Image: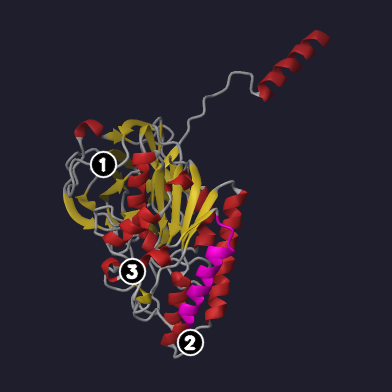
Amino acid sequence: MIRSSRWALVALSLALSGNAMAVPVTHWTGAWMAAMIPAPVTANAYRQQPIDAITLHDQTLRQMVHISADGQKLRLRFSNTYGARPLTIDAASVGLRAEAGSAGVLAPSLRTLRFRGRRAVTIPAGASFLSDAVALPVKAGQTLAISLHVPGTRTPKTWHLDARQTSYISRAGNFVDATQMPVAGTTGSVYWLSGVEVSGGRTRAAVVTLGDSITNGYHSSLGSNHRYPDALARRLRGQCRRAVLNAGIDGNEVAAFESRFGNGDSMLARFDRDVLGQAGVRDVLLLGGINDIGEPTMAASAHGKTVDGAALARQVIAGLHQIILKAHAAHLKIYGATILPFAGTQGAYSVPGEKAREAINAWIRHKAGYDGVVDFDKLMRDPRHRLHIRPEYDSGGHLHPNDAGYKAMAKAIPLRWFGCP
């Protein structure tokens, strides 16, 4: 009995120490993401009516996503984060897009998605769900066509409003297995689909770009992948094989301490989900604060009031500081970007707001404790009118860059931050 007990203890010790046979662990890396917000987007000081998601009537969604990582296998993440009731997806598929501007899928690449071995999945309210892994060799820079069918009539409550890509909606029916889907309409939004992860490729790490509409690429050319994170991904792809995940949301705020004026949860509130929740993340690049200034300015103006610039700056700085602490606690490198000039932006610009921007930028440059800072303010400002964005980079609203401006922003980011030679 003593000998038997001794051998049992030895076996248990080996198992606990990892010397026993172990299940291989697959390394996954994020290849694409969309930061989710609740639907509808509420009305505010400059938007008189709320913006709601489409209503699907037994239709198939075919959503196009541009990936930034290589892999031999992939899996997809579907989100019911803001749903009030369970979401059932009764069929889903993935494949390579046949050609630009098309809803078609290359037939040899079409794969059925399964969830714990089954075609259908029910996602609880407030949760997300990963598909099973599927063998499909992919390369950074390719576009995936991801199809899903939701039975009955459903209006999504979890979406990404401005995806800068055109996706497709079928007539009634389940067409996830069709290479040529009958198209009844299009959408510029992404519904329920929040991520693509890959394994087995050369891309082993990801950079999350956390931000607002400038990170999301507002006013960049639709469908052309000219947002600054896209341009950064192309630079990294040629140098050090690192993926870039775009966690930008139009109208998003850093902190939203007093009330939410912008869209979605604040960057501070969503950091765990949209940054720490991404596979393979090693670095964060943070650009934010303009909506914490501009949105309250517009709300105050609508009531004949002015904002307290010093108070706005304190709130943004406090929020940014907390995000930096969270990133470092998770052993991530976090890099900061100064806020772009915005003089001339209708409704959002004010003298107190400008003072807040300057105070925040000074803190970012000298006191924040980032692992590095890229000075987008200095890069993008007009040398003759320092409060304005350069005319050659202005998309027309005096805040958001055009394609050339986004490319210049990406070019200004030091690749050595990400281990590139």
User: Which label sits on residue 51?
Assistant: 3
Q: Is residue 293 magenta?
A: no
Residue 395 placement (x, y as % from top left): 27, 68
Residue 311 placement: quadrant: bottom right
SS class, disc 3? loop
Does any portion of residue 156 appear in the rendered image? Answer: no
Q: Amino acid at mark 1?
A: Val
Distance in Å between CA atoms under marks 3 and 2? 27 Å
Mark 3 or mark 2: name the one nearer the start of the chain: 3
**Which stretch appears magenta?**
352-370
For the residue pair 111 and 25, the one nearer the viewer reads as 25
User: Which label sits on residue 306?
Assistant: 2
Q: Quadrant of the C terminus?
A: top left
Residue drawn at point x = 53 percent, y = 49 percent: 276
Number of on-image labels:
3
SS class, disc 1? loop
Q: Is residue 369 magenta?
A: yes
